[in-house]
Amino acid sequence: MNYAKVNGLAHRLKLFKAKASWQMFRQNYGAVFGAAVIIIIILLAIIGPWIAPYDPAQQFSNKSFQPPVWNIGGSFSHFLGTDDLGRDLFSRLLHGARLSLFLSAFIVFVSAIVGVLIGAFTAFLPPILRSVVMRVMDLMLSLPSLILAITVVAIIGPGITNAAYAVILVLIPQFVKITQSGISQELNKEYSMAAKLDGASQNRLLFKHLGPNIVPAIIVQITFSFSTALLDIAALGFLGLGAQPPIAEWGTMLAESRSYIQYAPWTMALPGLAIFLTILSINLLGDGLRDALDPQINQ
C-alpha cells in the first residue's frame, strides 16, 4: 500500500469521525439548546450598545424602582424596570453581558495558551521535575477556584483587571493537567513510538502527532473553564473585589440590588437569571462537546 492510499484512508477516517461527532452532538438536545442560547447571548452582547435604549449609567431619578412592564406600574419605556438610581435594567444587562462574556473569553484564552504551553513543556521534563510541577498544580487545584481567586485579589487589590488576573491564575492548572496527562498517554502509544523510531523530531512529534489527539479534551475544558470564569468574575464583583460601580457587570448589579430584594426583587432576579441561564447553557454545551469529542466516551 503506497503513501497516497494511506493518506486517503486517513483523510476518510477523519471525515467519518467528524461526521460521527457532529451526529452525536445533534442528538443531544440539551447541548443543542445550550448552544442556541449561548449564540443568542453572544449576539446580544455584540449588538448590545446599538440596541440598548439608554446609556447604562444614565439615571432617571423620578423613575427609581420602576417595575417591569408585566407588573403593575410598569412601562414599555423601561420594560425590564429600573434600579434604585433609575437606571434602565435592560440596557445594563446588555452591557453587562458584553463585559462578562468578553472578559471571560479573554481569561479563558490566556489561561488555555499558558496552561497548554506549560503542560506540553512539562510532559517532556525528567520525571522528578515533572512530578514537582504537577504537585504544584495539584495543590492549586485542591483549593476551590473562588477561594483561590479571592486570595489573589486580596493580595494584588480589587478591580476588574486584577480580578481577571486572579481567575487566569486559577484556570491555568486545569489546562496544564489535561495537556500533560494527554501528551504523556499519547507518548506511550504505538504510533508515537513508531514516529520516534522513524526519526521524528520532538517538535514534529508534538505538533503533528500528539497535538491533534489532545485538542478535543482541550476544547471541552475551554467550555467548562468559560463557565467557571464567568461565575468567578460575577462572584468577585458581588463581593466588591471585581468590577466597581457604576460599571454594568452582572455580579456588581447583584451586589447593588441585594438591599432592595424585598420590595424591588426584579433588580436582583434579572441579573441573577442572566448568570444562571448563561452558565447552565455553557455547561450543557460542554457536556455535549465532551460526549461528541472525547474518544474514550465514543469508544
Image (tube, grey):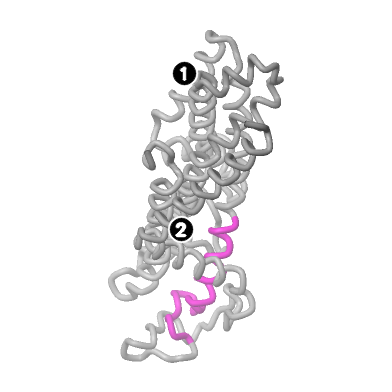
What element does badge 1 sit on?
helix
Picture residue at 50% right of the left edge, 14% below the top:
131
Q: Which mark is residue 273?
A: none
Q: Residues within 10 Å of mark 2 (few under 14, many from 20)?
A: many
Instruction: Look at label 1 and name its amino acid.
Output: Arg
User: Which quadrant is home to the C terminus?
Assistant: top left
Task: Name the spot of residue 92 as percent of width and height, x first.
Answer: 52, 72
Task: Name the spot of residue 185 as percent of width and height, x first.
Answer: 48, 23
Nearest to the eye among marks 1 and 2: give it.
Answer: 1
Residue range in magenta is 78-102
The question of residue 91 being in magenta is answered with yes
Question: 28 or 80: nearer the eye?
Answer: 28
- Tell me whether circle 1 and circle 2 mark residues in contact (CB < 8 Å): no
Question: 135 or 60: nearer the eye?
Answer: 135
Q: Which residue is disc 1 drawn over?
A: 135
Picture residue at 57% right of the left edge, 73% below the top:
56
State the predominant SS element of the stretch in magenta. helix
Picture residue at 48% right of the left edge, 25% below the top:
181
Instruction: Look at label 2 and name its amino acid.
Output: Gly
Judged left or right of residue 44, residue 277 is left
Judged left or right of residue 201, residue 86 is left
Task: Name the spot of residue 3 as percent of width and height, x first.
Answer: 68, 33
Question: 266 or 40: nearer the eye?
Answer: 40
